[in-house]
Image: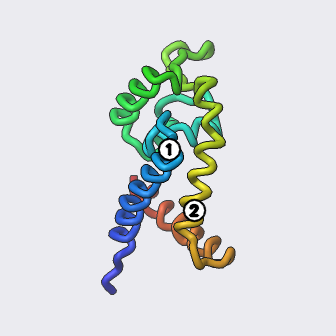
Amino acid sequence: MNAQGGFLITRIKQVGGRIFERILGEKNIDAFNGPQGRILYVLWQKDGIPISELSKETGLATTTLTSMLDRMEANGLVRRDRGDADRRKVLIYLSESAKALEDDYDEVTREISEIYYKGFSDDEVRQFEGFLKRVLANVEEKL
């Protein structure tokens, strides 16, 4: 069998990223870009987490994440803070302005989801995402 799943996933990520950026531009949202949106999304779910957890949740390498957080901090989207419990651990928090961007992000993700799942039934979406979760679990197991 000549399976193309990995290639297709990579291609969807590339094309989807370009569409995401285009939608951001069309909506005049310039406070963050697509990759920064991934970081913000995780922090909107759980604010005040260590970089190691943010790295795991976003799938971004710690070195990549650190430089992105530097830019996001300079742009007033996040702040770093040393937690009281363990002064060695740096926690990442959303700024108030970043918290206010969640609705914009949600609007863009709704639009891109409509593009991704055009012509799919709810059952097909659930089944497809179930398969993707299984693939993700398989590759994460190898890490």
For residue 143, above or below residue 100: below
**Disc 2, SS:** helix
Point out residue 132 in the picture as x, y percentages from the top left corner. 52, 67
Instruction: Tell me, for residue 113, which label it has, or none.
Output: 2
Front residue (pair 64, 77): 77
* Dot 1 crowding, Cα within 10 Å, few <14, some 14–19, many 20+: some
Q: Earlier in the sequence, mark 2 or mark 1?
A: 1
Q: Which x, y percent locates residue 13?
A: 40, 59
Separation (CA) of disc 2 from disc 1 = 15 Å
Q: Position of residue 115 (x, y in %)?
A: 53, 67
Badge 1 element: helix
Q: Amino acid at mark 2?
A: Ser
For image coordinates 43% across by 60% down, the residue present is 16
Residue type at mark 1: give it: Arg
Mark 2: few/some/many CA within 10 Å (<14, 14-19, 20+): few
Observer-nearest residue: 46 or 118?
A: 118
User: Image point 39% across, 73% down: which residue?
Assistant: 5
Name the quarter where the N terminus is drawn. Answer: bottom left
User: Looking at the picture, how far across and down is residue 23, in whole percent?
Assistant: 49, 52
Seen as rendered, the residue at the extreme bottom is 1
Q: Is residue 96 left or right of residue 24?
A: right
The residue to which callout 1 is attached is 38
Q: Is residue 135 above or below residue 74?
A: below
The residue at the point 57 percent across, 51 percent down is: 108
Which residue sits at x=47%, y=34%? Answer: 52
Question: Residue 112 or 60: which is nearer the viewer?
Answer: 112
The quadrant in which residue 124 appears is bottom right
